Image (cartoon, rainbow, N blue to C red):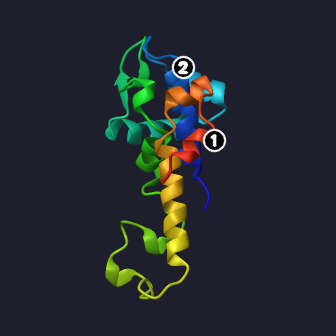
């Protein structure tokens, strides 16, 4: 399983906004320059993030983007799911998959429980690391220990 470029760049860009929270909006050109990401690609990413309610946009000379919530209220999982959809290691676990479209082995698949645990651990980890944690560097092994 690989994180898409959209997801990776989206997290990096949101960290830039978190570093500037709650001051004035950050223009995309500044994020693009600072993170070495195409401004056109960032425009696509931020259109999704705005539609999903994670960022606000401000027009004008002093315009740009800002976080819709404080950094401690936005987790990495929110960003990844907004940009990439559900986080699943295999297609048969996707929430978007219809039962009829699955491989038909869900009831007898011996590997399925491993994939489910992997999905749950990934989601748990990403849902327990906020943008604030990232900018402060305060996430580490204890986040993993919270998983039942």
Crowding at dot 2, Cα within 10 Å, few <14 / some 14-19 / many 20+, comes out as some
The residue positioned 43% from the left and 57% from the top of the image is: 86
**Relative to 147, residue 42 above or below:** above
Residue linked to disc 1: 141
Residue at the right extreme of this rendering: 36
**Relative to 15, residue 115 above or below:** below
**Residue 55, percent across and down?**
38, 30
The residue positioned 63% from the left and 37% from the top of the image is: 140
**Relative to 95, residue 14 above or below:** above
Q: Say which of 54 and 113 sits in front.
A: 113
Q: Is residue 105 left or right of residue 95?
A: right
**Residue 111, percent across and down?**
55, 79
Splitting the image into 4 quarters, where does residue 56 fall?
top left
Contact between marks 2 and 1 (CB within 8 A): the answer is no
Q: Say which of 34 and 131 sits in front.
A: 131
Report the label total. 2
The residue positioned 42% from the left and 22% from the top of the image is: 66
**Relative to 83, residue 97 above or below:** below
The residue positioned 46% from the left and 37% from the top of the image is: 75
Query: Quarter of the image containing the N terminus?
Result: bottom right
Q: Say which of 27 and 20 sits in front.
A: 20
**Residue 48, percent across and down?**
39, 42
**Secondary structure type for disc 2:** helix
**Residue 4, percent across and down?**
57, 52
Nearer to us of marks 2 and 1 is 1
For marks 2 and 1, the one nearer the N-term is 2
Crowding at dot 1, Cα within 10 Å, few <14 / some 14-19 / many 20+, comes out as few
Residue linked to disc 2: 19
CA gap, disc 2 to disc 1? Answer: 23 Å
């Amino acid at each position: 399983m690989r994180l898409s470029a959209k997801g990776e760049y989206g997290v990096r860009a949101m960290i830039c906004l978190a570093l500037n929270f709650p001051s004035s909006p950050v223009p995309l050109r500044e994020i693009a320059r600072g993170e070495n990401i195409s401004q056109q690609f960032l425009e696509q990413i931020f259109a999704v993030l705005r539609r999903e309610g994670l960022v606000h946009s401000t027009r004008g000379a002093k315009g740009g983007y800002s976080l819709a919530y404080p950094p401690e209220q936005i987790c990495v999982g929110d960003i990844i799911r907004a940009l990439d959809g559900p986080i699943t290691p295999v297609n048969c676990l996707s929430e978007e998959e219809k039962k009829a479209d699955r491989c038909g082995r869900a009831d007898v698949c011996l590997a399925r429980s491993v994939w489910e645990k992997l999905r749950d651990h990934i989601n748990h980890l990403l849902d327990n690391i906020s943008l604030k944690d990232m900018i402060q560097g305060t996430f580490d092994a204890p986040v993993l220990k919270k998983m039942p």
